Image (cartoon, grey):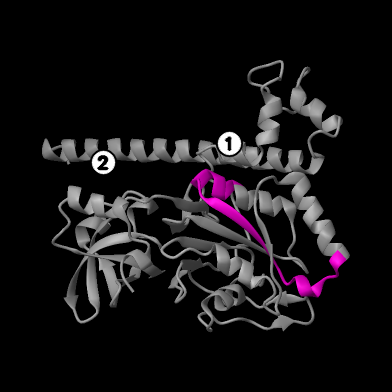
Amino acid sequence: MNYKDLGYNNYFEKYKIENNLDSFEVGRVISEHKERYVVKTPTQEYDAELIGNLRFTAESRYDFPAVGDWVAFSEYDDEKALIHAIYPRKSIIERQAVGKTGQVQIIATNIETVLIVQAVDRDFNLNRLERYLTICNASKVEPIIVLSKIDLIDETKLESMLEQINLRIKNVPIIKVSNQTKGYEQLKAIIEKGKTYCLLGSSGVGKSTLLNALAGSNQMKTGEISTSVNKGKHVTSHRELIVLESGGIIIDNPGMREVGIADTNKGLEMTFDTIFEYAKNCRFKKCTHLHESGCAVISAVENGEIDEDSYENFRKMEKEKMHFESDIQERKKKDKDFGKMVKNFKKQRKEGKY
């Protein structure tokens, strides 16, 4: 294995040279556990933590390493290391942090392609697919839809699902796989050496099974199916980066119950491009596409030119995005006010008023 096999390229090498990081070793974060990290090089893995300055100057989650990051580190003991710097990220897969207003959760970084996995026997959901696609589009990474467990439904039902997808989602590749390894050769064919792929999907859809099939070994534990609810038991408990022997890098993720939109990069416009094209012909520039006279989007929905369910999903996600952006602004205002208060307190204490 070499650094290219881990995904290292000229983009990161240029940053290392320009920022005088030659005195440090370079490695990739392959797992994270409560601000403790495992950093991998072509020859070794290190248990790592941040240096104090990096930890105390961090202003947000973006200032901490995430799975997929490249970092500059120094070894201080056998297989132990200190992280001194995080390299710039080429891409960030993120969502709204569950239960934390106006905050994001970084799922993985430096990804080229996301494999969106849905199990056709119990998990198929077009609205959720559009959510995952919006996350991908906001991050400017290529999405591929993987329909798993196709052996558990008949051909007619599968064809119906494919037709539904093609009506609402355009120009996104679809790969069908089964528990009997059908379709995995097609999936293996798209995995390129040195490229990083991220698995996204709900719990029990077969992500770990898929990873094991690609790796040709049991890299991740898989759960048995519950006969009472026909759901796979959730096994993956943390994000982990796996380098495949055949080439390619896969980041596995715990199943996501909530896929909150943290879209500030026009991900919605790319996912719902048809709606935005019609919106150009709306009578009013700031049309909300809800009740305005002369709304081209509403007319297209009524005429069947825009799928009604997709329109409703778009409206819901756009509302989430607006709330999220509002929450971010509110958090920034509170942080700014708090900063002013601290600065004023220090000034008055220096003047002897405290």
Crowd rating for badge 2 (residues with CA inside 10 Å; few <14, some 14–19, many 20+): few
Examine the image and state in which quarter residue 249 appears: bottom left
- Whether residue 288 appears in this view of the structure is no
The stretch in magenta equals 134-155
Residue at horizontal 26 percent and vertical 58 percent from the top: 55
Q: Amino acid at mark 2?
A: Val
Give me the C-alpha separation between circle 2 and circle 1: 30 Å
Residue 224 in which image quadrant:
bottom right
Question: Which quarter of the figure is the C terminus placed in?
Answer: top left
Image quarter of the N terminus: bottom left
Which residue has dot 2 on it? 342
Percent x, y for residue 274? 70, 34
Between discs 2 and 1, the one toward the N terminus: 1
In the rendered image, which residue does mark 1 sit on? 322
Locate residue 51 relative to residue 42 in the image: left or right. Answer: left
Q: Find the residue positioned furthest to the top.
A: 283
